[in-house]
Image (cartoon, rainbow, N blue to C red):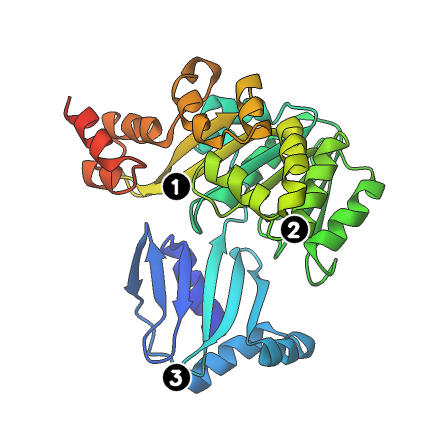
Amino acid sequence: MSILNDMLRNAVTAKASDVHINVGSPPLFRINTIVAPSDFPIVTPEGALRLAKEMMNEKRWAEFEEKRDSDFSYEIPGVSRFRVNAHFQRNTIALAFRVINDKVRAIEQLFLPDVVTKLTYLPRGLILVTGPTGSGKSTTLAGMVDSVNRREQGHIITLEDPIEYAFVSNKCAIEQREVGSDVPSFSSGLRHVLRQDPDTILVGEMRDLETTSAAITAAETGHLVFSTLHTVNAPQTIERIIDIYTAAEQNQIRSMLANTLQAVISQTLFRRCDQPGMIPGVEIMLCTPGVRNCIRENRIFEIPNIIATSRAMGMQSLDDSIKHLFVNGYISKEDAIAQAAHPEKLDRSLAA
């Protein structure tokens, strides 16, 4: 067994979410948000070089040496798959691994609000899952796609960089295309995907103007589109999309987004205090007529108030979600306050 595989097997056994390889320190495992040294030896420059080369073919290695960064996936059959970023720091090779569960967790097991499952029944439109890196966006998206796969008889196409969860066709036919190997870019894949007869499309990330435009167009033409953004709440998500466009285009994109956007699910992960593991705090914005008018008329600042007053429809603010997690004993008060959108207001609410 190679040292690389031995190390990654240990990480999976320890239930680590991430592994970091940096020269001058032992491999680091992130377990329930805490990064700590493993029992493996300190990594040398030669050792980091060997680990990186073990995972790359000649073409990828040449590209890595030229661009100094590379994203790809790695798999140990029967153990797990890993999302890998190889990069340089202080002129030495460093590696970051994200552990990807082989088994897609059913959406009912993810501690998400019931309305998230209901969103997978929509026939068309754009659904965005947002949050910082490591907030569980990929897990939520996988659960939503799995829900469609178990229920519908249709065609699902995913565009990912790299492929994370490996889906098995159930009632749906699923195709997974990896950026860099199956397709040159997200935007290229989206340009051609509409000719491949999809019902549901998953776009790993709306990271540039071309990808964003293509995703919105796909939703506008009658497809259900799932995607992600690195934003922390619904208003910021909408503003981020609109700001990608030039000033002359923004009125048009507000109208298109108001017509196609169905929901924004913004989440952050908390370390559980009742048992080992993580649990999400979730803001839900549903595109009601009121929200659509706010988007169309550039009154984004009014959306938080609509979310706060629309609980009966399934919307919820992040702080309401956090309060629910604390009151039910899932998370500590310190973590609740630390990650709240309005810490002082939540603190007073929890003390009441």
Quadrant the C terminus occupies: top left
First in sequence: mark 2 vs mark 3: 3
First in sequence: mark 3 vs mark 1: 3
Q: Amino acid at mark 1?
A: Thr
Residue lying furthest front: 248
Residue located beneath label 1 in the image: 268
Q: Amino acid at mark 2?
A: Leu
First in sequence: mark 1 vs mark 2: 2
Return the x and y of residue 314 as percentages of the image width and height.
Answer: 46, 19
Q: Residues within 10 Å of mark 3 (few under 14, many from 20)?
A: some
Tell which of 94 and 68 is nearer to you: 68
Tell which of 30 and 124 is nearer to you: 124
The reply, left or right, for residue 4 in relation to residue 29 is: right
> Element type at marker 3?
loop
Residue located beneath label 2 in the image: 209
Return the x and y of residue 24 as percentages of the image width and height.
Answer: 33, 80
Real-space Cα separation, disc 3 to disc 1, in angstroms: 35 Å
Residue located beneath label 3 in the image: 44
Using the rendered image of the protein, determine whether residue 287 is visible from the camera's viewpoint.
Answer: no
> Element type at marker 1?
strand
Return the x and y of residue 97 as percentages of the image width and height.
Answer: 47, 62
For residue 279, above or below residue 314: below
Q: Residue at x 53, y 37 (%)?
A: 238
Q: Residue at x 59, y 81 (%)?
A: 65
Residue lying furthest right: 195
Q: Amino acid at mark 3?
A: Thr
Q: Nearer the viewer, mark 1 or mark 2?
A: 2
